Image: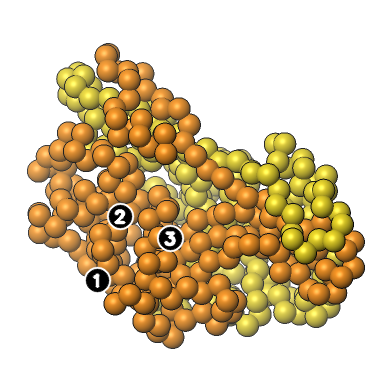
Chain colours: A yellow, B orange
Amino acid sequence: MTTLSPTPRSTLRRHKERARTDRADLYAVLDAALVCHFGVVVDGAPLVIPTGFGRDGDTLYLHGSTGAASLRAATEAAVCVTVTVLDGVVYSRSVFNHSMNYRSAMVYGTARAVTGEPEKRHGLRVLVEHMAPGAWDYARQPTAKELAKTAVLAVDLAEASVKIRSGPPSDDEHDIALDERWAGVLPLQSGWGAPQPDPSLQSRREPPEHVVRRVAG
Amino acid sequence: MTTLSPTPRSTLRRHKERARTDRADLYAVLDAALVCHFGVVVDGAPLVIPTGFGRDGDTLYLHGSTGAASLRAATEAAVCVTVTVLDGVVYSRSVFNHSMNYRSAMVYGTARAVTGEPEKRHGLRVLVEHMAPGAWDYARQPTAKELAKTAVLAVDLAEASVKIRSGPPSDDEHDIALDERWAGVLPLQSGWGAPQPDPSLQSRREPPEHVVRRVAG
């Protein structure tokens, strides 16, 4: 399945020109962000939790403490996982047409608790490798106790919508013709700073290759 | 009220050392982010929508099209507005202690529809000025028709939690003593690129002062 099969709630009704229906766009947006915002209903009210995540094919992995009430509430329940990358601010000639350039994905589904140890370990690996590529093999592996303290949830990427705004302002023809005001995009850029070694390191103050490689881009 | 009065759901139960209870910290996190993730319950399922916002004192303003179903569902209903600023990736000696440095705020409340024109205009001004400082006075003002097409919601900042992680990894003493692996933080930095003038500008290709000032920091 290379396209996103639309459902009523995953179909954009506003700004349809910003919709993407290619599954590759969904993957690209998810892979470009480090944090997702994970929505769950607790006692009838929404809860939006920022958290790390990872993707393997069409499965999204989330994790947290087994003691977290929000994770327990999400298990086998309806969730919405949203990922947003902000690319810039769109300065228009009119206040009304000010906007932002962004890439966002909304995933709708049911969170499944990952209970078997092989998949749990796999999900955590996917998650850690998304946050810090190369770290899983480099760092000390999880103990049985650490694994037991960690809850892993899986969300299927079956139902999702992708929305992308890029490019210059979309001003009204009248405002453009007047040519009275500047308009354009102020791009937002992000990048890695220099690695900051843990002050408690006794030796090995030089970052390992997977960290150096990331900074180099 | 200079502190955040805790309620059961706004009280952190996990990683309590990351909690901030000063109202100034809530303001600082909200003011540092351009996008919020707005959670609402639609047909029993959570919906997490990325959107711009603005803050005036203890009121958060959100906006959208009057035609948006999510905004209609949010009106006079329970919402959760979460803002997250990612500051870096925490590389630990163990896989388990990998983490992120971040500042986040979760606001719980009921979204009130802003109906009177003076407050609607004020809310939009606050919102546009948060996204693009200086733009409201520079750009063409909204027409009555544009105002009618825009729905503005207000959320009171009465109930909120703030969570901040900063600083080096928190590894186990045993792992630190072993001194077998590097650990540290890779800071994530963001900044503005050069303004990109709208190709449809006929003259006035030099950005105005409020844009120039933002890029200069």
**In screen coordinates, is B64 left or right of B196?**
left
Q: CA distance from mark 3 to mark 1?
A: 25 Å
| Residue drawn at the location 17% of the way across and 53% of the way down | B122
Residue A177 placement: quadrant: top left
Where is residue A28 drawn, in percent x and y? 60, 42
Quarter of the picture holding the N terminus of chain B: bottom left
**In screen coordinates, is A165 left or right of B138?**
right
Where is residue B48 drawn, in percent x and y? 44, 61
Where is residue B114 drawn, in percent x and y? 17, 61
Q: Are marks 1 and 2 in contact (CB under 8 Å)?
A: no
**Whether residue B88 is situated above or below residue A171 in the rendered picture:** below
Q: Amino acid at mark 3?
A: Val
Q: CA distance from mark 3 to mark 2?
A: 12 Å
**Mark 2 belongs to which subunit?**
B
Where is residue A96 drawn, in percent x and y? 23, 40
Few, some or many C-alpha atoms within 10 Å of disc 3 (few <14, some 14-19, many ≥20)?
some
Mark 2 highlights which residue?
A: B54
**Mark 3 belongs to which subunit?**
B
Numbered disc 2: secondary structure: strand
Mark closer to the observer (1, 2)? 2
Q: Amino acid at mark 2?
A: Gly
Compare residues A50 and B206 and report the one nearer the observer.
B206
Mark closer to the observer (3, 1)? 3
Mark 1 highlights which residue?
A: B76
**Whether residue B134 is situated above or below residue A38 in the rendered picture:** above
Compare residues B156 and B16 and report the one nearer the observer.
B16
Mark 3 highlights which residue?
A: B29
**In screen coordinates, is B8 left or right of A169?**
right
